[in-house]
Amino acid sequence: MLKKSDILNAMKQYFGHSSFRDGQERIVERLLCGGDALCVMPTGSGKSICYQLPALMLEGITVVVSPLIALMKDQVASLIQSGVRAAYINSSLTPAQCRKALENMARGVYKIVYVAPERLLTDDFLRACSSLNIPLVAVDEAHCVSQWGQDFRPSYLKISEFLSLLPERPAVAAFTATATPEVRQDIKSMLGLNSPLEITTGFDRPNLYFGVSVTQNKDSSFLALLSERRGKSGIVYCMTRKNVEEVCSMLCLNGYDATRYHAGLSDEERRENQDDFVCDRKSIMVATNAFGMGIDKSNVSFVIHYGMPLNLESYYQEAGRAGRDGSRADCILLYAPRDYHMARFMIENSSADNPETDEETREALRQRDMERLKKMVFYCRTTDCLRGFILEYFGEKAVRECGNCSSCMTEYEVRDITYESRMIIECIKETHERFGALTVTDILLGRDNNRIVKYGLDTCFTYGKLSGTPESEIRRMIDELVMTGYLETSGEEYPVIQTTGCAKGICSGKVNVTLKVPKKRPAAAACKKKKPAAAPAENEELFERLRRLRKKLADIQSVPAYVVFSDSTLRSMCALLPANIDQFGEVQGVGAEKKERYGDIFVMEINSYLKENGG
């Protein structure tokens, strides 16, 4: 058994870190001892070190299974920068490149090889593995093995067969950012994990601000948010390809350096656009959820969802691509009621076109997806702490107020809505629970549209009872009654609102209902956001100089800037101001190889800055 000091020395040598994050040490020790592990760790929590560090300390070659071509490329580039021999095998390689990589692998040239799951059972790959010592197989995005996960991939079912064909079974480590208990059980059984160490680190990302803006005019709200973030790197997620095209065009017309990414573009254009964003030639990426998995770009300072995702699992994974290096970052969701109908349409069509499952399973998956969608809508409408809502969804205990989300940073007043709630419930009852929220609202407002006239709803007792109340407030009240269990929705194609047994208490006068409403609504966001703490003013110029130097070095090597150093490492340089090569080695994120490769040039730049500024 290796000593802890040996493990820490190796981590400092290769990755430049002197201490572990939450959960990392136990995982590393387990894998070094040859045991299996199942690790649920949020984006940005340092999953890669958990398998890369053991891989460097174990005899033989570690195989990392990943579906993400971009991640493979970036992580291999980062490993090579750190002095580690690594390679990837996926569809981006030419046949000649693939043969060369397999030959090198068979000769034991590499310590770590990333491979796409589709390649595992090919004759060439199995032949290369047959004579190798493979002590560890790491499975990234392990939730893809479960049909109950949000990203099921049939190719992941090949992993267990691949393991059975190896001369000796290696230790197996499964990693995922989000997984329900059901998905975790699937991962263990489908991968055949043997009594794995199960680690679920905290899902909380304290450096991320979460905000929701409920708006009827997304474009104006969106542009207002972007105007506060000019020059910063960010991702904008849209629900459809058409949205991506429209939003990207709008940004370009308004002077933003934006590019786009969706499945309708050619492979070449997607690759070029992704490289432009990753290498900071374009500051904003507008994309569908086809973009982002495996993008290790550390300086993404905001993620804005132009439309509501289908579930909180997807939302948290996508939002988590901001602030990966620990810097302050914003995650803001623009929500309009029509988003729900678009999301429901997408769920119904995706489940109908899934050939991998039978009809009964498809229906079960559709019902599950609809339940997840309801939770997503609740997140968009709640006035409670957004961080707390997310953490509770993933089974964690959360504080009532985080102080860093739109709910916690908005002043509310509590209104008694008992009368309005009683009218809503009475309206639903007297129309025999046949209508949805839109028609119920029209009745209460006293409207005389075609549906009201057709069904004679203008004769209802509750017709016009809330005529002086804004439509948006009635919809908010209905949402609140659904979230608190007094109402429920049923039916998917034409959802209707129904009362529950709890509603009797409101109608009998035994229960009072209150609603939190904002005292004032800022123009762009759902709240007025506190300004994040900036780096010391005297070092902002140095930080920008180091960024320019980093980009120059990255461009020479044709790698993304963050592969050279992350923003957090540059800020550590600004704080420590290393005056010589030995001091440079103490900066967090500077390992032995990068100290040797970049130390002199960065120390020279820092000393030049200090000399010019009288330091």
Image (cartoon, rainbow, N blue to C red):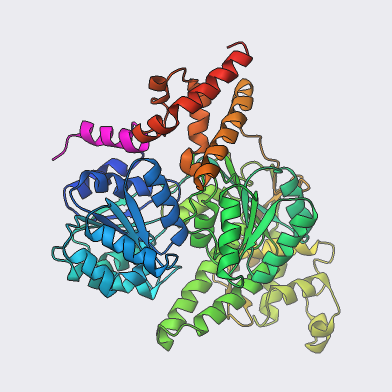
Q: Position of residue 240 (x, y in %)?
A: 64, 70
Residue 272 visible from this viewpoint: yes
Which region is colored magenta?
1-18
Relative to 149, 305 lies left or right: right
Q: Position of residue 445 (x, y in %)?
A: 81, 70
At 78% from the left and 47% from the top, the residue drawn is 523
At 73% from the left and 42% from the top, the residue drawn is 228
Residue farthest to the top? Answer: 614
Relative to 235, 558 lies left or right: left
Residue 505 visible from this viewpoint: no
The foreground one among 364 and 358 is 358
At 32% from the left and 44% from the top, the residue drawn is 84
92 up-or-down from 533: above or below: below
Q: Quadrant of residue 509?
A: bottom right
Q: Quadrant of residue 410?
A: top right
Q: Position of residue 5 (x, y in %)?
A: 22, 31
Q: Position of residue 497 (x, y in %)?
A: 63, 75
On whether residue 14 falls in the magenta region, the answer is yes
The foreground one among 603 and 189 is 603
94 up-or-down from 490: above or below: above
Relative to 454, 344 lies left or right: left
Q: Which corner quadrant holds the N terminus?
A: top left
On whether residue 469 falls in the magenta region, the answer is no
Q: Which secondary structure dominates the residues rendered in magenta?
A: helix
515 up-or-down from 230: above or below: below
Q: Which corner quadrant holds the C terminus?
A: top right
How many callouts does the rendering have? 0
